[in-house]
Amino acid sequence: MPDGAIFADTQAEPASVYKWLDWLETQLPYPLYRVTKGSLSDAALKMRVTKDGRKFSTTDIPFFTLSAKGVKGKIPNRSCTFDFKISPITKELRKLAAIKRGQKEVTVTSYIGISWDEWHRCKPSRDAWVQSRWPLIELRMERRHCLEWMEKNGYPKPPRSSCVYCPFHSPTEWRRLQTEEPEEFEKAVQFEKAVQFEKAVQSVKSQTRENFHSTPFLHRSCVPLDQIDFRSDFEMGQLDIFAADHSCEEGMCGV
Ligand code: SF4
């Protein structure tokens, strides 16, 4: 039995996830700790300025990019998962398990819910005092097996946890958000517009790369979110083809 569960809140999850979490908390036989570094949206939109007037943001989301010459790309050095998920979770773990400075001895086991169909997302722990385990991998359970298990045991269907505007969304997830949670989809649309405005002058860290002088988008087509027809066969057909690179490889988002 785990001693507790930790939820790192980016403050940008859809309403369905927060509702689910409230329900889940009433079901779990162990405490649920909610931690947050604040609003990821605010951090991504807050631009800092260097002495010579160039703008940069301290947290990068994995946007797709389109240069003035029409070249598509992707921001390579995203930091949102580390800053807003891994780091707050590690901080809470340190506190709960009373980890000493410089500790190497393993005293914490971290269970991460990556399913068998996403095994490539499993990574060893960054900290010597934590050993990671992936129970769904050990049980060879794919996402569909989890959903079947929930249904068989009389539980509701769980939503997938990730920010409403995450560029890792599959076309199916965009479509689900658009039809089932239109207010959340609209938040993503507005976020894309805001980030395009704020990042018009790009990061000083990346000034030598063409992509960073480009316009950020949430969808790989580099078409504004509210202009994409997620019902089209082409869009929906991309789900499986691109499933692997539509995942957060840090293994913390979307579980
Ligand atoms: S869900 Fe997406 S946008 Fe949110 S922290 Fe994870 S990778 Fe970043």
Image: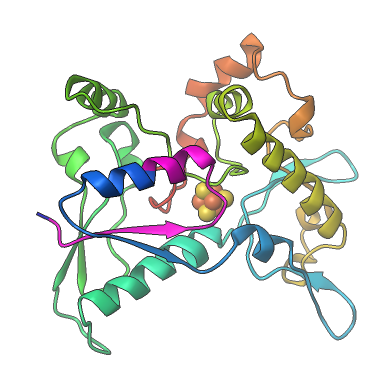
Most distant residue in the left direction: 1
- Is residue 13 found inside the magenta-colored segment of the image? yes
Of all residues shown, which one is farthest toward the bottom? 101
The quadrant holding residue 225 is top right
Residue 124 image point, x, y percent: 27, 59
Which of 119/69 is in front? 119
Q: Does residue 223 show up?
A: yes
Q: Is residue 144 left or right of residue 202?
A: left
Task: Say which residue appears at 51% left-offset and 37% top-offset.
Answer: 246
36 within the magenta span: no
Up the image or down, 33 lies above or below 135; here it is: below
- Residue 155 placement, left or right of 39: left
Q: Which residues are magenta?
A: 2-20
Question: Can you give x and y, in whole percent of width and height, for residue 193 in the image?
Answer: 81, 45
User: Is residue 113 something one can see in this rendering?
Assistant: no
Residue 136: x %, y % from top left:
21, 39
* Residue at the (84%, 46%) spot, across then down: 67
Q: Quadrant of the N terminus?
A: bottom left
Which residue appears at 21% of the width and 68% of the height?
Answer: 130
Q: Is residue 99 left or right of residue 211?
A: left
